[in-house]
Amino acid sequence: MRYRLAAAFAAIYLVWGSTYLAIALALPAIPPFVLMGSRSVAGGLILLAFARTRGARLGRRGWLVGAACGLLFFVGCHGVLAVAEQRVPTGLASILLATIPFWTVLAGLALPLGKPARPRALLLLTPGFAGVALTAWPALAGAGAADILMLLGASLSWALGTVVSERQSGETPAHALGGAALVTGGLVLLGLGAATGEMPRIDPAGLIGVPGLAWLHLTLMGTVVAFGAYVWLLERVPPPVVGTYTFVNPIVAVALGWAVLGEAPTIEMLAGGILVLGSLVALLWLEPPTAHRKHKQKEESRVSLDARCPAAR
């Protein structure tokens, strides 16, 4: 379990951090709604196929929950992010999305859903938010207040999706639920792309080369691998701890932007990164990612059923 947890966290930390660069490389050939919608639908179909090979089936309730998660994760967050990024720099957008753990903790405290969040988690997140503010401060003057509020709203939408998804742990197979969320949310995004006139702006010739490779990376690594790891982690780890990926992603994005696009980090970014990592280490140290009791009871129940009926495998 320890190694699987480490691999899952590596996926949401490093792979999702690399998606900001991949999006920048793919946008010249694919408009934002179509880019995010197509990667979501393709990745979701792959996850659903994988879940089916493992005998997972989604009933009507599973699809309804998946659709709710899809609207919160991919329309309310990714869709709003796509609109805001037409005016807000990618780096600033990624930093503002680092407020997701804050909203997740608040949702856990305010809503009777999921595993109860500890109030002290807010205190542990404080250095991380200080790092986010330090990193974002020089760029805030160039962004409008409406765009900032939109991005904070996108963070809240993803946090609510996290709580809803975590609430279903043990009730709906993780990969099947993730696939349903991706497909439903992706279809809505594609509909938005069609409604806003993005389809004629797709450059088929541009897909042969870097933009096409970037789309494959977004779909296979960013969607299938990383999002599959994300929903898997939500069954085993408290949501605020899973949400710490939003602290690491901007650091990875800045490093890749520096290495590939020549975007040198500023002193504020480096100092903010130290505060962010300090908050992450403190949260992981005091909120260790161990399998929760509900998951263990589910596994014990499944083992007992398998012992009585081999066909249950």
Image (cartoon, grey):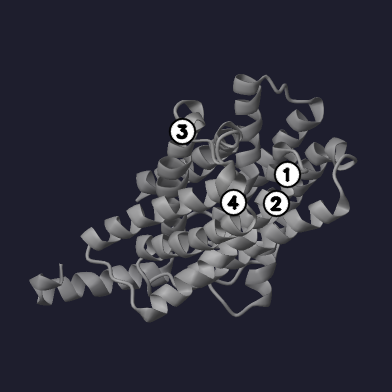
The quarter of the picture where residue 111 lies is bottom right
Residue 240 in view (yes/no):
no
Residue 6 image position (x, y, % from top left): 43, 43
Q: Which residue is mark 2?
A: 83
Q: Which residue is mark 1?
A: 86
Residue at (71%, 37%) from the top-left corner?
A: 91
Quadrant of the snapshot with the C terminus: bottom left
Q: CA distance from mark 2 to mark 1?
A: 6 Å
Q: CA distance from mark 1 to mark 4?
A: 11 Å
Looking at the rendered structure, the secondary structure element under dot 1 is loop
Residue 105 image position (x, y, % from top left): 66, 64
Q: CA distance from mark 3 to mark 1?
A: 21 Å
Q: Nearer the viewer, residue 30 or 75?
A: 30
The amino acid type of the residue labelled 1 equals: Gln
Q: Which residue is mark 3?
A: 212
Q: Nearer the viewer, residue 296 or 262?
A: 262
Left or right of 152, for residue 252: left
Looking at the rendered structure, the secondary structure element under dot 2 is helix
Residue 233 image position (x, y, % from top left): 45, 56
Residue at (49%, 68%) from the top-left corner?
A: 165
Q: Is 36 above or below relative to 173?
A: above
Number of other residues with Cα within 10 Å of mark 1, as a class: few under 14, some 14 to 19, many 20 or more = few
Left or right of 112, for residue 222: left
Give residue 126's mark: none
The quarter of the picture where residue 21 lies is top right
The amino acid type of the residue labelled 3 equals: Gly
The amino acid type of the residue labelled 2 equals: Val
Give residue 33's mark: 4
Marks 4 and 3, the one that precedes in the sequence: 4
